[in-house]
Image: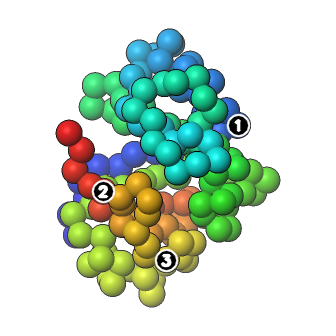
């Protein structure tokens, strides 16, 4: 198994406000967003409501996702459940990891191809923490 990087995905009420705070307070830059209610990508902050945003500062990458979007995207996850963060792990070969782990973990989302180009699956660890393993398309 080859893990490449891990990115926390924070579940928040207001993605744009959260991204603005990280930008203005901590110096993060907007990398990518998804406009709320769509599958339309935004590559700059546009002032539109966001369902998802990816922010970067140096080598640190964070994701913010609205509770509404999480509930729609990841069955079994909800604002009322206490879920507030997920670990999103970039891996070399998600299919091989899925074959190795699927029978050993509590799957939340089965292996799938997403509209944003990732191939991923999500599960809970022994403490209920949500973890997603994914092979993402190369950027840049």
In three-dimensional space, the C-alpha distance between marks 3 and 1, rounded to whole angstroms, equals: 26 Å
Among the 4 quarters of the image, the one containing residue 139: top left
Q: Judge whether 112 appears above or below 87 on screen.
A: below
Q: Judge whether 42 appears above or below 135 on screen.
A: above
Mark linked to residue 136: 2
Residue that label 3 marks: 110
Give the residue at x 70% y 50%. Answer: 68
Q: Position of residue 58 (x, y in %)?
A: 28, 25
Q: Position of residue 137 (x, y in %)?
A: 27, 55
Q: Residues within 10 Å of mark 1 (few under 14, many from 20)?
A: some
Residue that label 1 marks: 13
In three-dimensional space, the C-alpha distance between marks 1 and 2, rounded to whole angstroms, equals: 26 Å
Give the residue at x 49% y 67%. Answer: 122
Q: Do the residues bearing badges 1 and 2 touch, measured as CB atoms within 8 Å?
A: no
In the image, 91 versus 17, the foreground residue is 17
In the image, 75 versus 41, the foreground residue is 41
Give the residue at x 65% y 39%. Answer: 12
Q: Position of residue 28 (x, y in %)?
A: 41, 22
Give the residue at x 59% y 36%. Answer: 50
Q: Earlier in the sequence, mark 1 or mark 2?
A: 1
Q: Left of 80 or right of it: where is 132?
A: left
Q: Earlier in the sequence, mark 3 or mark 1?
A: 1
Q: Judge whether 9 appears above or below 95 on screen.
A: above
In three-dimensional space, the C-alpha distance between marks 3 and 2, rounded to whole angstroms, equals: 16 Å
Residue 62 shows in this picture: no
Q: Secondary structure at mark 1?
A: loop
Q: Left of 90 or right of it: where is 45?
A: right
Q: Earlier in the sequence, mark 3 or mark 2?
A: 3
Q: Position of residue 83 (x, y in %)?
A: 66, 53
Among the 4 quarters of the image, the one containing residue 115: bottom left
Please, which residue is most extreme toward the top here?
Answer: 24
């Amino acid at each position: 198994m080859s893990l490449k990087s891990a990115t926390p995905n924070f579940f928040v009420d207001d993605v744009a406000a959260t991204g603005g705070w990280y930008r203005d307070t901590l110096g993060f830059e907007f990398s990518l967003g998804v406009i709320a209610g769509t599958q339309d990508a935004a590559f700059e902050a546009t002032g539109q409501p966001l369902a998802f945003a990816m922010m970067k500062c140096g080598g640190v990458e964070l994701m913010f996702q609205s509770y509404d979007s999480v509930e729609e995207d990841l069955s079994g996850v909800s604002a009322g459940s206490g879920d507030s963060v997920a670990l999103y792990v970039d891996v070399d070969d998600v299919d091989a990891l899925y074959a190795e782990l699927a029978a050993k973990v509590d799957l939340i989302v089965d292996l799938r191809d997403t509209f944003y180009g990732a191939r991923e699956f999500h599960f809970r660890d022994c403490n209920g923490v949500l973890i997603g393993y994914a092979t993402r398309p190369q950027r840049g």
